[in-house]
Amino acid sequence: CPWENGYAERLIRTLKEEEVYLNDYQDIHEARDRIGHFITQVYHQKRPHSALGYLTPAEFERQNLS
C-alpha cells in the first residue's frame, strides 16, 4: 500500500522517471551499473528531498552528525 511505503514508492517513481525511462540499457550489467550510479551519486548526493528540508540526503546526514 502506498500510504504504508510512501518513501519507497517515491524512490521507485523517481528512479523510473529520472533514470530508467530515459535510457536504453544494452544489458542487465549496464542497467545495474547505471541505476546504482543514479542512486548513490545523484539521488543521495545531488538531488534535494522535500522531506529533508530540501537538502540532499548527504547534506542532511552531514548536518545532523555535527
Image (cartoon, rainbow, N blue to C red):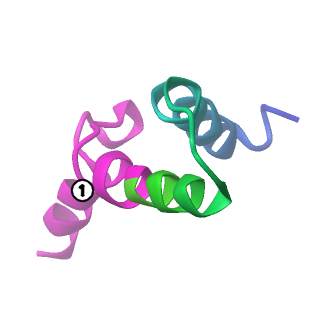
Q: Residue at x 24, y 60 (%)?
A: 58
Mark 1 residue crowding within 10 angstroms, few (<14) / some (14–19) / many (20+) = some
Q: What residue occupies the far front of the structure in this picture? A: 26
Residue drawn at point x = 41 percent, y = 37 percent: 51
Does residue 4 appear left or right of residue 59 in this picture? Answer: right
Dot 1 falls on a residue whose secondary structure is helix
Residue nearer the viewer, 30 or 41: 30
Q: How many marks?
A: 1
Q: Position of residue 31 (x, y in %)?
A: 57, 52
Task: Identify the residue position indicated by label 1 in the image.
Answer: 60
Q: Is residue 44 above or below residue 14?
A: below
Q: Horizontal placement of 3 versus 63: left or right?
A: right
The three-letter code of the residue at mark 1 reads Phe
Describe residue 23's horizontal placement relative to residue 52 as left or right.
Answer: right
How far from the left and from the top, in percent, is residue 66? Answer: 11, 75
Q: Is residue 62 left or right of residue 28?
A: left
Q: Is residue 53 magenta?
A: yes
> What residue do we see at 60% from left, 31% from top?
16
Choose top left, top right, bottom left or bottom right for residue 20. Answer: top right
- Which is more toward the observer, 23 or 3? 23
Q: Quadrant of the N terminus?
A: top right
Front position in the image: 17 or 4? 17
In the rendered image, residue 29 lying in the magenta stretch gets the answer no
Q: Position of residue 43 (x, y in %)?
A: 37, 47
Looking at the image, the residue that sits furthest to the bottom is: 65
Instruction: Characterize the magenta stretch by its predominant secondary structure.
Output: helix
The segment highlighted magenta reads 38-66
